[in-house]
Amino acid sequence: MPTFPEDIYTEPSDLDGHTLANLGPLRRMAGLWRGEKGVDVKPKAQGPKTQTYVEHYELQPIDPQTNGPQVLYGLRYHTFIHKTGFTKMYHDQVGYWLWEPATETVMHTLAIPRGQIAMASGKVSAGADSFELVATHGSLVNGIVSNPFIEHAFTTLEWRIKVDFHPDGTWSYDQDTVMQIKGLSEPFHHTDRNTLAKVGEPSPNPLALQPR
């Protein structure tokens, strides 16, 4: 069990406002990215369907966040995905990537316009070249919440995301969303993976201290 301070109200007096200098393993993700070789395996009535997609991923630094003595540095993100050869949105997702230096923990939140939100987390060293985060159905701290239809028909049992940073400056993710689908005896693994290349630099709060 984690150990928390007795004083749950007092914020740090020496808070460093340089977000980009305090993002730990997330520093390499800040900026604008594009990935053109995404692969999605999704459930259909006829069986699994594999398709490719193009992704536009924006991650912008936010000012440090405090919950009393707890300090979080993070990136606000928006990823917009369309199928190869089409312009219509296929998947839209927003949320935050958060780093807690004191506990070396990465948290990843998501909200999608299908009526579902989730938060995954994991222990990660500040200089890690790869890490994995997990959210589990029913958890109150790393959980998944869905609208009634999704919960009924496509119950999400687990969401797992693995991130890898590459020497050429790109980074990739591999996601596995495990669902218990109505009418199927075994859980279905809905997977997504892509590699992203930087196309633009991040834009910190212009009124705040600039990164070192």
Image (cartoon, rainbow, N blue to C red):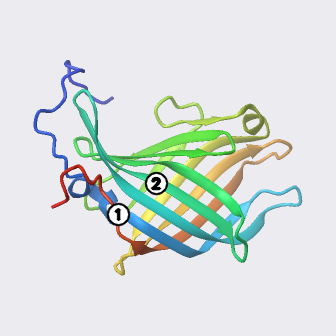
Q: Secondary structure at mark 2?
A: strand
Choose between 65 and 138: the one closer to the eye. 65
Is residue 89 rendered to the left or right of residue 96?
right
Q: Tell me if mark 2 has few (under 14), some (14-19) or many (20+) residues whose alpha carbon lies within 10 angstroms of its own.
A: many
Measuring from the top left, give residue 163's x and y in whole percent.
44, 62
Task: Identify the residue shown where x is 46% and y is 54%.
Answer: 77
- Is 25 rendered above or below residue 117? below
Is residue 180 rendered to the left or right of residue 75?
right
Q: Tell me if mark 1 has few (under 14), some (14-19) or many (20+) residues whose alpha carbon lies within 10 angstroms of its own.
A: some
Disc nearer the start of the sequence (2/1): 2
Q: Can you identify the residue that label 1 sits on?
A: 202
Q: Secondary structure at mark 1?
A: loop
Q: Amino acid at mark 1?
A: Pro
Task: Identify the residue shown where x is 30% and y is 61%.
Answer: 27
Q: The C terminus is located in which quarter?
A: bottom left
Choose between 203 and 150: the one closer to the eye. 203
Choose between 205 and 171: the one closer to the eye. 205
Which numbered circle lies on residue 77? Answer: 2
- Is 25 rendered above or below residue 1? below
- Is 101 rendered above or below residue 82? above
Measuring from the top left, give residue 96's x and y in whole percent.
43, 47
Measuring from the top left, give residue 177's x and y in whole percent.
63, 51
